[in-house]
Amino acid sequence: MKTRKSIIKRFKITKTGKILRRATGLDHHRAKKSGNKIRKSRKRVKLSKAEAKVIRRLLPSR
């Protein structure tokens, strides 16, 4: 089965096997958000178990 290239670009897999994604809400409407909220959302966010299960299916070679 081939790997979904769009999934590789959007998610990062850590050495221990956790799947990380970008925080939501960073594309537009930033003026109304506090600087503190914007700074916190720069970090990667860990996926829930249910979401990670789906993403792992789309990454067979990893």
Image (spheres, rainbow, N blue to C red):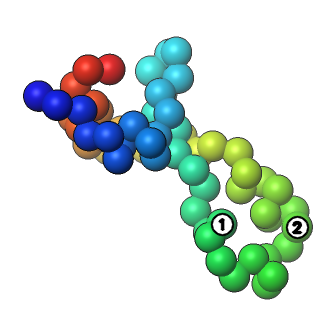
Q: Residue at (32%, 40%) from the top-left corner?
A: 5
Is there any visible trace of residue 47 in the rendered image? no
Residue that carries the numbered disc 2 in the rendered image:
35
Where is residue 36? Give x, y as percent.
87, 62
Quarter holding residue 4 = top left
Q: Amino acid at mark 1?
A: Leu
Camera-side residue of 21 and 4: 4
> Circle 1 is placed at which residue position?
26
Residue 49 placement, left or right of 27: left
The nearer-to-camera label among 2 and 1 is: 1
User: Residue 9: which quarter of the image?
Assistant: top left
First along the sequence among labels 2 and 1:
1
Q: Is residue 28 above or below residue 38?
A: below
**Residue extending furthest right?**
35
**Residue at (11%, 28%) from the top-left corner?**
1
Q: Residue 25, relative to residue 29: is it above or below?
A: above
